[in-house]
Image (cartoon, grey):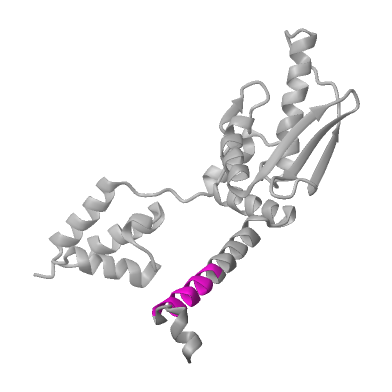
Amino acid sequence: MEVIKNLDVPESCFFDEYSRDEMDFNNESRSHESRSEVVANIYHKMNKIRIELAEFNIVKGNYNEYSKYYYMELSDFLPELLRLCDKYGVFTQISFSNEVATLIITNCDAPAEQIIFNSPMRDIVLKATNAMQSLGGVETYQRRYLYMTAFEIVAKDVLDSTATSVKEAKMKPVEITPKQIQALFGLAHSKGYDGESVKKVVYKHYSKGIRELSLVEYDYLIEQYNKLSPNL
């Protein structure tokens, strides 16, 4: 007891020291957890990037007038891809030889982890171009297809034609316009039914909102309301 008195250390210091130790332990644990999340293996990172790219809904932004098909360029997906690579700590590098184009994907948090994709080099015929322009065209094609292969970027084949696009357009339901919606409400009102009752009828029969009606469904509703006697 006398030894304790001679130490002349306030009791609170023991608790303060304990608190600091506990706090350091907690901080170290959180830091370790944070590092564990950051240093994910390259396959996990690639899956994350592929999933987010698929959710980005990339569309083909270019049209080939000569061959009549839509196609995808690097500019349609590369900005979003680079953003995701930076987000998940992944570095990409493309190189070319006379025989093969190579894409190397490296885990920035563990540089020894790499995934390599190869594509054989092929000449392509580009009209009204010199040798250097043709080479640039080949390398651009290779970059695009290497990225599309590595990151599972979905796009239609080069053989897609406008006939396919027209067929898809015909299959897609034609949406009604705001003026048509107004006309439906106006007709229903003239028969003694308010907007809420119209919405309930639409949802009951089609399980969707008025704005989601197809033109066929809209025409049917107009026909049915025209048959009704005024509910005044």
Residue 146 sits in which quadrant?
A: top right
Residue 14 lies in the magenta-colored region: yes
Q: How many marks?
A: 0
Instruction: From this view, report whether residue 132 is shown above or below residue 87.
Output: above
Q: Quadrant of the C terminus?
A: bottom left
Residue 154 sits in which quadrant?
A: top right
Instruction: From this view, report whether residue 127 is shown above or below residue 86.
Output: above
Residue at figure coordinates x 69%, y 49% from the top left = 109
- Main secondary structure of the magenta stretch: helix
In this picture, residue 120 sits left or right of residue 60: right
Magenta extent: 12-24
Residue at figure coordinates x 38%, y 59% from the top left = 217
For this orientation, the residue located farthest to the right is 99
In this picture, residue 172 sits left or right of residue 85: left
Residue at figure coordinates x 24%, y 56% from the top left = 184
For this orientation, the residue located farthest to the left is 232
In this picture, residue 48 sits left or right of residue 18: right
Residue 136 sits in which quadrant?
A: top right
Point out residue 169 in the picture as x, y percentages from the top left corner. Answer: 53, 43
Residue at figure coordinates x 74%, y 12% from the top left = 133
Instruction: From this view, report whether residue 163 is shown above or below residue 130.
Output: below
| Residue closest to the eye, 188 or 200 | 200
| Residue closest to the eye, 21 or 132 | 21
Point out residue 194 in the picture as x, y percentages from the top left corner. Answer: 16, 65
Regarding residue 73, the answer to whether it shows in the image is no
Residue 26 lies in the magenta-colored region: no
For this orientation, the residue located farthest to the bottom is 1
Regarding residue 61, the answer to whether it shows in the image is yes
In this picture, residue 160 sits left or right of residue 22: right
